[in-house]
Image: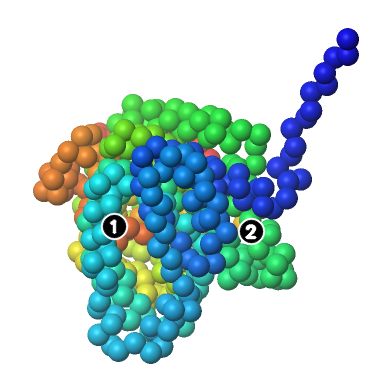
Amino acid sequence: MSSAVATPPVSFASLPFEEKLDRFARLAVHVGLNLQAGQELVISASTEMMPLVRRITEHAYKAGALLVTTLYSDDEAALARFRFAADESFDHAPQWLADGMAAAFRGGAARLALAGANPALLAGQDPAKVSRANIAASKANKPAMELITRHAINWSVLASATPAWAKLVFPDTPADEAVAKLWDAIFTASRATGDDPVADWKAHSANLHQRVALLNEKRFHALRFHSADGATDLTVGLADDHLWAGGGGASGNGVFCNPNIPTEECFTTPHKDRVDGVVQASKPLSHQGTLIENIRCRFAGGRIVEATASAGEDVLNRLIGTDEGAARLGEVALVPHSSPISQSGLLFWSTLFDENAASHIALGQAYATCLIDGETMDAEALAAKGANSSLIHVDWMIGSPTMNVDGVDQNGSSEPLMRAGDWV
């Protein structure tokens, strides 16, 4: 009787691209969203992402989705607005569409956003019009986004490679090769290349949860970021009754999901009035089609009182001026320099990836889920704890191989958390 010989698993690298894309789509549905039978799904994507959207839609229906609805954007159409629209267009947003999104989420629909649009799409457009359009869109979408920041539903964000984005990441590489290299980088960073990505993500979440538990046990009053070169010396007070989070978690509807793919961060809510010092960005920020480089800010009493950038400074200052909360912090996150995304050596020009290569802060809206019982609090109660409120939430990176981070307790005593960019 002959013995059977086990067939070794096929390596991800050797698979045809279509099979890789299919596995990635399956990861989006079962790891990112953990989509439930009978749930609706709302997807937002650009027209260049249709191949991935179609595969995600297929796997969503196989998982029992009731209905999948995709809202597409188009770069050329977006540019046409800035070239030809009347001035009043830039103070307008489709409120009816935003209301429909909020209604879908309140009705239990899951949300999936695909990142990858051209990071420099609006770089040559009037910054004032860009700012006005962003403010109008933020106001219209606030009810829907509040359900996201309160983690009321299962939602996720992951990336799709596009030619314009690939050209920015790999500027000296032929177009087709650049797109292929970007896809490989996305698959690797998103932990999609193993024999069992679901198991890999469970293990990764468990590691992040362990770090989160240690940080929550410490109950630090503040964090101090200080770089070896002196460019950053920033004290970030933490909100009263703050909670650290990281990895996947259960949403308000009881579904465990992974909101960001990839993710390497442990994050919490700063106190909106207790941030002081100077901070310098360690990576460029791509915001709504504009690249902002070499950001440097000074905080006093929680608020930015001075902000400069070597490129995109006008856009930065308009962003900060969006509303009262836009000049204050809504998130602080710790990410080791040894993270896989950092070690890749790539600048992705995408917050989804670059924020997972370095510790970072975010201007604007705080996450209610990063406060004890925050999901049950109204806006006044959240503010009393120190949680910031704003129309925006924009992350930018401050961590580096020279960054040190200390946890500071209520009495002012400090404990080293990170040295030279990595956990102590």
Q: Which of the numbered marks, if any, corresponds to residue 311?
A: none
Q: Amino acid at mark 1?
A: Met
- State the residue position of label 2: 182
Please tell me which residue is depicted at 27% across the width and 72% down the height of the picture.
93
Residue 398 sits in quarter: bottom left
Residue 153 sits in quarter: top left
Image location (x, y in percent) of residue 371: 24, 38
Q: Nearer the viewer, mark 1 or mark 2?
A: 1
Q: Nearer the viewer, residue 343 or 189?
A: 189
Q: Nearer the viewer, residue 12 or 50?
A: 50
Rendered view: 404 above or below 70: above
User: How many numbered marks appear?
Assistant: 2
Q: Amino acid at mark 2?
A: Leu
Q: Which of the numbered marks, if any, corresponds to residue 101?
A: 1
Q: In which quadrant of the rendered image does the N terminus lie?
A: top right
Rendered view: 100 above or below 57: below
Instruction: Give the residue at the far left of this rendering.
Output: 380
Rendered view: 350 above or below 110: below
Image position of 50 (left or right of 247): right
